[in-house]
Amino acid sequence: MLNKMLINMSKTKEIVFRHPSINHFLSPAPISDVAEISSAKLLGVILQNNLHFDEQITAFLKICSQRSYLLKMLRDQGLSKKNMDSVFHALILCKIRYALCAWGGHITEANKGQINAFLRRMHRYGYVSAVYNIDDLICAADAKLFSSVCIVHHCINYLLPEVKTSHYSLRKRDHHFELPSWHYSLLRNSFVIR
């Protein structure tokens, strides 16, 4: 109210996040005139109330499958392998890599199998010269994010743990931070801990 913004109740939705393995979940009292939904799209990422990303993966694989038709047309017209790789990166790989650090650690082995099967199929059809793997893409995205976050002026640099101090000569590591502790797998799989 201070900034004179009004909430449009017809566009307002409510999503209640819950742990995926809870058997008896007591939902909070619903807000009047607000519809409760099980998933919501936020900045291009579909968040589900059970903290799974099945809908996200189904959605981007559907879009990537549609885009693969363009790759087929370009391949059939004789586009070179180098240019096919460029188009594949621009149309397919960028879609898979989008916000990968946010959802990549939370996907199941079945989800990884779906993505890897799609990527192998793209290679088999000749749309790309290399075979990509989702685990490698996640590791590369995490490494890139970590190197960015280590810059002092980065907006999420404050999430990094304290620098580890030791009087012993320890083996070489990729970083000099204290290893964070975690108690739940959902936290362990988050990009901050990874």
Image: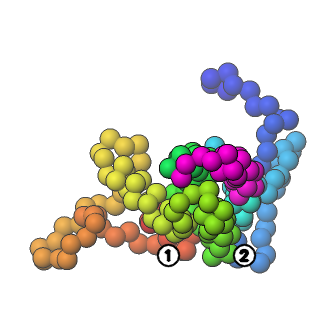
Name which residue lies at 51% across and 63% down: 130
Q: Is residue 23 among what the camera can see?
A: yes
- In the rendered view, does 128 fall on the left or right side of 50? left
Near-viewer residue (106 or 139): 139
Q: Which amino acid type is shown beneath numbered disc 2?
A: Ile
Name which residue lies at 54% across and 52% down: 81
Which residue is denoted by mark 2 in the rendering? 22
In the picture as drawn, the residue positioned furthest to the right comes out as: 33
Q: Residue 3's x, y, as percent?
A: 62, 23
Near-viewer residue (174 or 26): 174
**Residue at mark 1 to residue at mark 2: CA–CA distance:** 16 Å
Name which residue lies at 71% across and 47% down: 73
- Tag 2's secondary structure? loop
Q: Residue 103's x, y, as percent?
A: 59, 60
Q: Is residue 67 among what the camera can see?
A: no
Upstream in the sequence, badge 1 or badge 2? 2
